[in-house]
Image (tube, grey):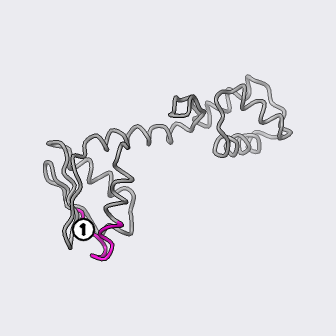
Amino acid sequence: MNKPARQLRIREIIQQEHVENQHDLLRLLKEKGVKVAQATLSRDCAELGIIRSKTHAGYRLLFAEEHSGRIIKGLVGMEVVSVAANETSVIVRTLPGRAHGVGSWLDQFHSPLILGTIAGDDTVLVIPDSVENISALISYIHKNLSTN
């Protein structure tokens, strides 16, 4: 099997299975008919940005960008103090000086629920696309900013 096809199989396995280490990955590849040496697998993992990380379910091989996204989400979530709404808008209160980062984090998702955000020092005004979507927007914010 050529390198691109092998790396595609590795990606598929990492995304679909709970793989704790390279030994398990090597075994799963063999089960799928992919013959590869440990040294080659190690190089493939490095090229694909696969890391071993501790999760709530134990150790797992992950793509580095997936791992860093979880870390950033956790950090941004710790900056949020509260989320409140009225009939027309949502307010996210943050630690002092953190509103801009939280607003930028929300903006990066390009959610159709969010028309825009305006950040001050410790407050982010989140303007919904429609007042009918306020509760959905609050749930969305909790999902994307909460450390829970």
Name the spot of residue 140 as percent of width and height, x first: 37, 59
Horizontally, residue 116 falls left or right of residue 30, namely left
Q: Residues within 10 Å of mark 1 (few under 14, many from 20)?
A: some
- Position of the N terminus, as image quadrant, is top right
Residue hosting label 1: 127
> Residue at horizontal 28%, vertical 40%?
78
> Residue at horizontal 32%, vertical 67%?
135
> Residue at horizontal 26%, vertical 54%?
103
Does the stretch in magenta take in 129? yes
Horizontally, residue 16 falls left or right of residue 122, namely right
Foreground of the two, 106 or 38: 106
On the image, which quarter does residue 4 sit in?
top right
Foreground of the two, 81 or 127: 81
Does the stretch in magenta take in 81? no
Horizontally, residue 62 falls left or right of residue 72, namely right
> Residue at horizontal 21%, vertical 46%?
81
Q: Helix, strand or loop at disc 1?
A: strand
26 lies above or below 98: above
Name the spot of residue 66 as percent of width and height, x first: 50, 42
Label 1 sits on what residue type? Ile
Q: Outermost residue toward the top?
A: 39
